[in-house]
Amino acid sequence: MIELVKHFVILYGGLFAITNPVGAVPVFLGITHDLSRKERREIARKTAITVVVTLVTFALIGEWIFRFFGSSTDAFAIAGGILLFKMAMDMLSGRLSTVKISREETEEFSEEVVTLEEVAVIPLAIPLISGPGAITTVMLYTAKSTSIPEKAAVIASIVAIAVTVWFILCSSNRIQERLGRVGIKVMTRMMGLILTSMAVQMIINGIKGAFGI
């Protein structure tokens, strides 16, 4: 039981660093600046649901994807580690990773007239929060989980992250007021530092597994 709790905490911490919901606050406020509080909460709810559906789906079908493309989990770990490292470097610079979403895409969605569903799904849930890095991570964690309880811990961590995303987006105004843009950038850099160590470890594990070291 203690091992499962430890497994869950590690997964949750890793996914929190990768999804970086605090870093998504300025984008969320920029896109929803002319909406009411009720509409913002509705977008936050739909974003959280989309995050769960997306990550759980890839977590469950990840092993079949590996088999279909003939890719090993070690090869995917190396590729995923490189991807996460690129994201981490962007975050250490205090900006959102271009692997997730570009500035042009953010401005485009801020200016376009779109529905609440469209805003919640794209760009907030995909690719800003549950982007390539998060998808890669849950696929790898699930593939490397050797028991049903461990796989359940992966799903539980995804649900916990989605609840966290919902809470942070609902509290986005207060977070922006208390932390400010500088505080959010500091948080993003901290998440980037954690993500860097995760990426390097993922690459090392992939190399060890691939070459039998």
Image (cartoon, helix red, strand yellow):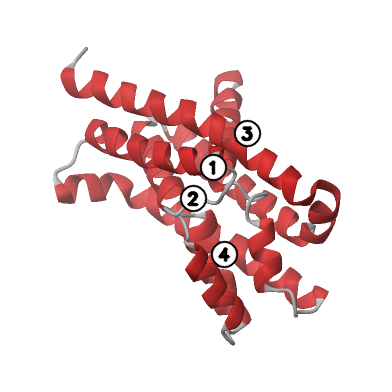
Look at 49% across and 70% down and name the residue there. 105
Inter-mark Cα distance, 4 to 2: 14 Å
**Is disc 2 surrounded by few (<14), some (14 to 19) or many (20+) residues within 10 Å?**
many
For numbered disc 2, what is the local secondary structure? loop
Q: Residue furthest bottom?
A: 113
| Residue placed under numbered mark 4 in the picture | 124
Question: How many residues crowd mark 4 within 10 Å: few (<14), some (14–19), many (20+)?
Answer: many
Left or right: where does residue 100 sit relative to residue 3? Answer: left
**Which secondary structure lies at badge 1?**
helix
Q: Position of residue 139 (x, y in %)?
A: 37, 43
Which residue position holds label 1?
91
Q: Mark 4 is on which residue type?
A: Leu
* Distance from Cα at disc 1 to Cα at disc 2: 6 Å
Q: Which residue shows up at 59% across the image and 87% down it?
A: 113
Q: In the rendered image, which quarter contains the N terminus?
A: top right
Residue 68 in picture, x, y percent from top left: 17, 51
Q: Which mark is residue 190?
A: 3
Mark earlier in primary sequence (4, 2): 2
Residue lying at 17% horizontally and 19% vertically, measured from the top left: 211
Image position, residue 109 (x, y; %): 55, 76
**Residue 189 is drawn in which quadrant?**
top right
Tell me, for residue 146, which label it has, or none: none
Please say if the residues under marks 1 and 2 sit with CB atoms less than 8 Å apart: yes
Judging depth in this view, the residue of 193 and 19 nearest the camera is 193
- Label whose residue precedes the other's in the sequence (3 or 2): 2
- CA–CA distance between discs 3 and 2? 14 Å
The numbered mark, 4 or 3, whose residue comes first in the sequence reads 4
Residue at far top of view: 213
Give how far apart the Cα atoms at labels 4 and 3 are.
21 Å
Mark 1 and mark 4 lie on one chain; the one further toward the N terminus is 1
State yes or no: discs 1 and 4 in contact (Cβ < 8 Å): no
Residue designated by label 2: 97
